[in-house]
Amino acid sequence: MSIDSSESAPEPDAAYDELTDRFARVSNLAQGALVLSWDQQTMMPEGGSPARGKQLSALFASRHDHLTDERTGELLSTLESSELDDERTAVVREIRREYDHAVDVPSELVEELTEAQTASQRTWQDAKAEDDFASFAPTLEELRELHVERAEHIDPGKAPYEVMYEGTDPDLPLSTVERVFERLREKLVPLIADIEARGDDLPRPFAGEFPEADQRALCEAALDELGYDRSRGRLDTAPHPFMAGNQFDARVTTRFTPDDPLDALTATIHEFGHASYQLGLPQEHYGSPLGQSVGRIHESQSRFWENHVGRSRPFWERFLPTLKEHLDGVDDVTVDEAYAAVNRIYPENLIRVEADELTYHLHIILRTEIDSAFVAGEVDADDIPELWNGKMEEYLGVVPDTDAEGCLQDIHWSTGFASFQNYTVGSVLAAQLDAAVREDLDVDGLVREGEYEPIAEWMTEHVHRHGQRYRTDELVEVATGEPLTADYFLDYVDEKFGALYGL
């Protein structure tokens, strides 16, 4: 596809208007693809995958062509040599970032990669259902080859994994993340070992099986409790919980485990946190970088609401009666028991999205190590099950009986590589944000009274409303007053789990 690029260089105001109009089209094409992806994972008929892959590849190819057209480059050059205010400078900076990350990638490769990723999601679902990693391995190899090829087009002088990590958000260096990971590894491994050595097991009061309809009603009630805007969202189920949307339409999903209602509940609160970020973005900047979220900030919002609100004692003082209204057989559960149950450490767990707040990060570290080695070609897809199981035993002392509970449990390799870091970065930043918001608000008192709006408004004021005005590292400082640090997270887990386990 070619777009007319014969126009002469306009004045800065006209150039800015033309550039932002072009980018709005790029953004809307991406949003359309997002809705198709949401549909694929929630309600599309099983046989629809081949057509859906072609639909998505066409949308992404069109987006790529509009973004990388020669005229876009001319407009960027015009504006970068002009005097701009801070807002316009940020918009041009972010569009330039996306442009540079795409301009050297052939449109044909974009289509091929999109179609392969779409098809791979069904392959992954089937492989997981059948516990058959061998059927997924060739797809995984193909995806690696395509992603590496794309990375080499973007920056042939840099390691493909680093190019993939940077994506459209290179402002939190991989070296910074690696230092955070090292501190967490040094702290969490012995802390978890200390908890296990004590032999204390916190209460498990939610025994038995709970119908999906009851669990769904509970999750809907939790969304209402937290203030989810139903006019701009909905709850559905998916094989792997996720959120999709923008400031006008942010949909959440969850999944249900018959014998563990806390799993669906915490997953729903987690995805609510993602939705709160999207819904807090400025509506007047929809289609502009100023109306888009910062990727590496997103998990801080979900982990804040899941862990610092949904797993807090004040939340359970208020929410336990609601839980009892929706689930049978839990009338005698106390606040102490519910609070302990939702925060219990269980290293024997095999599933990341069901992991407790501490061992969760060892799941992430494990994935990141395999992810990096696989992209670098140090291991083949066929090696992953054995490598996975070995690291599970090393870090958590357990080995999955099946690949469905091991290396097939996550959908993420169907959508790309070098993204697992975001989950741990999000938890670290969530603790830093929690400390900052508590300087201004009585968070526990507000949660205890069900007054969540001031907390949401604080997040919107300090994080959401900025869109991509600031780089990632700058936004962390704007929101919290200091650079990203693991200190608050480590202090938080010391205080919380020390009290729970009497350490």
Image (tube, grey):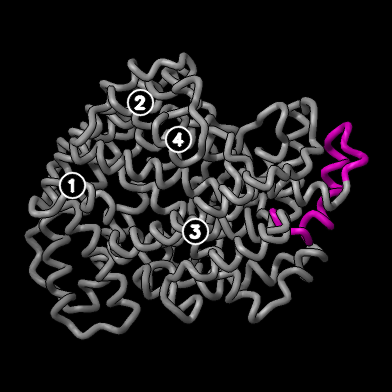
- Determine which residue is flagged by label 1: 160
Amino acid type, residue under disc 1 in the picture: Pro
Relative to 242, residue 453 above or below: below
The answer to which of marks 2 and 1 sits earlier in the sequence is 1
Q: Are marks 3 and 2 in contact (CB under 8 Å)?
A: no
Amino acid tagged 3: Lys
Q: Which residue is mark 4?
A: 392
Report the magenta residues as a range: 311-333
Q: Which residue is mark 2?
A: 386
Residue sitting at x 17%, y 61%: 72
Residue at 46% across, 14% down: 130
| First of labels 1, 4 by sequence position | 1
Residue 187: which disc? 3
The C terminus lies in which quarter of the figure? Answer: bottom right
Q: Residue at x 54, y 50 (%)?
A: 249
Cα separation, mark 3 vs mark 2, equals 26 Å
Disc 3 crowd rating (10 Å Cα; few below 14, some 14-19, many 20+) is: some
| Direction from residue 435 to residue 76 in the image, left or right | left
- Residue 268 shows in this picture: no
Q: Are marks 4 and 2 in contact (CB under 8 Å)?
A: no
Q: Picture coordinates of residue 214 (x, y %)?
A: 78, 32
User: Which residue is situated farthest in the front direction here?
Assistant: 197
- Name which of mark 1 and mark 3 comes first in the sequence: 1
Packing grade of label 2 (10 A; few <14, some 14-19, many >=20) is some
